[in-house]
Each structure stands twice: as structure tokens, then as C-alpha cells.
Image: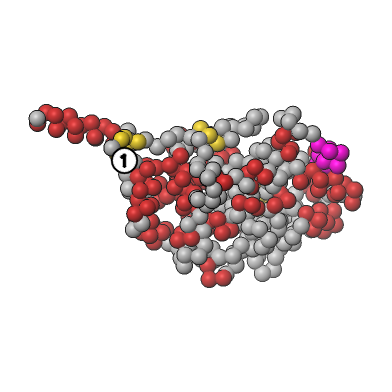
Amino acid sequence: MKHRITISVLILIILSCTGWIWADHAYLKPKPVTFTVPQGWPQPVYDFSQNPLTQEGITLGRELFYDPRLSKDGSLSCGSCHQQFSAFATYDHNLSHGFNNSLTTRNAPALQNLAWQKEFMWDGGINHLDLQPLAPITAEHEMAESLQHVLQKLKTDSRYRRLFKAAFGDENINTQRFTKAISQFVLTLVSSNSKYDRVMRGQDTFILPEKLGYQIFQQKCVSCHPAPFFTDFSYRNIGMPLDPVLQDLGRMKITGNPADSLKFKVPSLRNVMRTFPYGHDGRFFSTINLFDHYRKSIQQGPTTDSLLRKGLPLSNFEIGQLTAFLYTLTDTVFTKDPRFAPSGSGPSASPPKDVH
């Protein structure tokens, strides 16, 4: 009898070490999710070996993403500023809204195709996706909370203890698991099913204005916005005058190098017709405003991008055709996918078995 008890204990220890958990009289292990790279795309830069995707991890990450308790007064979630219908950007507002009706200093960028990005935020101030949530959660004018208090709130919630156990094998809630769970969810936010993508796969065709716009885009825009991400992830000064109130110097704030003054990350143009207003501070309300800047208002300075030294001549006709093409970058499969919405949004809102 003694030997049987010893063997049983050893089995439980082994199963615990391998990540198996006991539930409803059966051993359950987090279900792996395959991250599928879209056809023709490069391999992601995110190291999935350090944070393997699982259905349980994605479910937990989605709950955290949409939970307003991550903010100081329980009024703001990550999803408050990153709205799905706007490709997880801030819709309509130039500056994102934060704690106590304050305004942040920048426009929240879209969250899409993050697995291929090495640096985050307009100035690249965060160099790992797992660290990204810590910045808005603790920023005074964003969620204004302390990480310690967030974790304490999660630990006192029996539902979260169950979710962490399902995702990681036990109820331990710590910073690493918290941030990795959010990463698992946002890594699934892959946008690769716009009309442009269907055309490239031979499943659709451009109408004439879209085709002409694509040709103009290849001539005048592709240097900074190459496919498939429609950004080269570089930092550039596009000749926007310094806002006298915000005094935002962009990349220079991180590097301290004057050569980086007024340089900001080149945004992706995927879903661009859903992510207005534009610019790091949302000063351009529409694409027309942005086109007018490029053809009329570029401010030349010591760090203005060399590609814009002579401006960017665009006729009204070209702007019209470019606009038609930019609409083909809208991915409604992505912006309407119930798997990316708050849990319980529909019968198909379960986490994906495969991420495309």
C-alpha cells in the first residue's frame, strides 16, 4: 500500500512538471495553437519558443485586454483605446483619452501583425512585445495604475485564478505570465485578408481606379510603405512642424541623438481608411489632409527625410486613384472577427486553433 501511494505521488509530480493539470477527473494540458505565416510573408521576429501560443493563453490574454480593472479607476481597458472596428486603433480622436478624463500625448496606433515587429510605440521606446502593456498601464495620463495593484486585483479574483491555471498549469499570477498572456492574444491579431491580399493571391482583381492607384503607390509611396506590412518599420521625419504644446521630439526622446529629432515610426497603411486620424498626434483627420501635407506643407529641417527634400508632388487625379487603392487595404475579415472581440460577443468568439 505504501508503494502505491509513493508511485501516485511521483506520477502527480511528473504531470505537474510537464504542465498537465487536473480538472473534472481528467488531466488537461493547454491546447497548442499554430501560428501560420501568410503566403509570401517573412518569418515573424517574435520568439514563440519563449511563449508558445495556446487556446487557454489566448483566452486569458483576451480577458485581460478587455478588462477595465487594469486601470486605476476601473474605467479603461486596453480595448478602450484599441478598438477592433478601427483595426485596434483609436477611432476619431486625435489623442487617446486616459485616466480622469485626461488626454495622452499621442494617437494610439493600430495593433496588427505585431509578431513581425521588433520595437513598439511611435518612438520605438519598447523593444519587446511582452513589455509593451506595462507602459500604458503605469502611465499617468493613460491607465494610471501600478502593476503591483493590477496583479493584486487579479489574484483576488477566483475566475482569473482558474484562467491562469488553465493557461500555465497553476494559479500563480505574476508579471511574466500576465504580460505573456496579453502577448498571446495580440499576436493573433493578424491582418492579411484585404482585397489587396486577395488580388495578390489571384482570388480577386482590381477595378481600374484601384489598379491605377496601385501603380502610383509603387512609384511614390512604396519606399516607406512596402508590402506586405505597408511599413518598413523605420523612423522618419516627414516634415511635420513641432507641436508647441506637446513638444514631442519622437525618436530623439529615446536615443538622445539630435539626428533623430522629430522622427517617428512609419505607420502601416493596412486598414488605413479605418485608423484615422493620422500622425503620431492625430493632427491629420483624413487622408486628404495627409495628402495635402505631402504635396504642400512639408517643413524642411535638418532631419527631414531625404526622400521628401523636394516634397511629394501629387495631382488631384493621383490622389483620387491612390485613395481607391488604399481602400483595398481594408481587411473586414480582421476588423469583424469575433475571436478578437470581448469574450461572449458571439458563438464563434472562441480562441483560434490556428492563427492565419
Quarter assignment of residue 231: top right
Camera-side residue of 296 and 165? 165
Q: Is residue 111 left or right of residue 319?
A: left
The x, y position of residue 163, in whole percent, is 39, 47
The structure residue drawn at horizontal position 50% and vertical position 50%, both measured from the top left corner, is 343
Residue type, numbered disc 1: Ala
Q: Is residue 139 magenta?
A: no
The x, y position of residue 242, in whole percent, is 71, 63
Quadrant of the frame with the N terminus: top left
Report crowding for label 1: few under 14, some 14 to 19, many 20 or more residues within 10 A (C-alpha): few
Quarter assignment of residue 141: bottom right
Q: Is residue 212 magenta?
A: yes
Quadrant of the frame with the C terminus: top right
Q: Is residue 340 left or right of residue 7?
A: right
Residue reaching furthest left? 1
Q: Is residue 231 above or below residue 263?
A: above
The x, y position of residue 322, in whole percent, is 82, 46
Residue annotated with mark 1: 23
The structure residue drawn at horizontal position 60% and vertical position 54%, both measured from the top left corner, is 83
The structure residue drawn at horizontal position 74% and vertical position 59%, both measured from the top left corner, is 284
Camera-side residue of 339 and 128? 339
SS for dot 1: strand
The structure residue drawn at horizontal position 75% and vertical position 42%, both measured from the top left corner, is 328
Q: Which residues are magenta?
A: 206-217
Camera-side residue of 62 and 180? 62
Magenta segment, principal secondary structure? Answer: helix
Camera-side residue of 294 and 260? 294
